[in-house]
Image (cartoon, grey):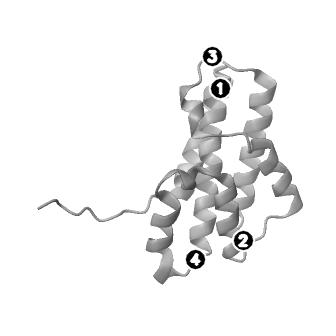
Amino acid sequence: MASQRKFHCPDFRRAAGQRLTAAEYLLRAELFLDAMYLAGYGVECALKALILARTPLKKRAVKCKEISTGNKGHDFEFLKAELKKAQCSLPPEILKLMGRVAEWTTDWRYKVGLGKHQPAKDFFDAASQIRGWVEERV
């Protein structure tokens, strides 16, 4: 008989902070592509933390699994739609910042090279501001 492992919901809020801290370190080390990749995960985790904060406690385990399983959990459009379902609309300034990080994809894990400073800094700044906005709401 195959063992059934209980699903454990990650601490998305702390993960967002850690990913952005690591991204900042990589940015200073001039590993720009890697900084952008991790900053994108910071945005993903921040949005997931906000979704769960807006989900009733009795429904959190199911919602956590829903937003954490499969590729859709990495899709910012899916996560924004989940926020909308949770009665959390993103203000225009945050939507603009989301536009600056919209290109992010988990496929970046296969990209090679260093990247460029200004696009990485802009991406990181947008990701940091999105996380800051989320932190005020969780």
Q: Residue at x 68, y 24 (%)?
A: 32
Q: Of label 1 and label 4, which has the lower sequence position?
A: 1
Name the residue that disc number 4 marks.
55
Where is residue 17? Give x, y as percent. 59, 48
Looking at the rendering, in which quadrant would you find the C terminus? bottom right
The residue beneath circle 1 is 33
3 and 1 marks in contact (CB < 8 Å): yes
Extreme-top residue of the structure: 113
What is the quadrant of residue 54 in the picture?
Answer: bottom right
Q: Nearer the viewer, residue 67 or 93?
A: 67
| Residue beneath the point at 67% across and 75% down | 85
Give the mark toward the camera: 2 or 4.
Answer: 2
Residue 40 at x, y percent in the picture: 64, 42
For discs 2 and 1, the disc positioned in front in the rendered view: 2
Q: Amino acid at mark 3?
A: Gly
Q: Which label sits on residue 50?
A: none
Give the mark, 3 or 1, whose residue is nearer the N terminus. Answer: 1
Disc on res. 84: 2
Left or right placement of residue 50 versus residue 61 in this view: right
- Gap between marks 4 and 3, in whole Å? 40 Å
Would you say 72 lies left or right of 91 here?
left
Residue at mark 3 = 113
Question: Closer to the N terminus: mark 4 or mark 3?
Answer: 4
The amino acid type of the residue labelled 2 equals Lys
Please, what is the three-letter code of the amino acid marked with disc 4?
A: Thr
Could you say whether the residue bearing mark 1 is in a helix, strand or loop?
Answer: helix
Residue 50: give x, y in percent of width and height: 63, 65
Looking at the rendering, in which quadrant would you find the N terminus? bottom left
Secondary structure under tag 2 reads helix
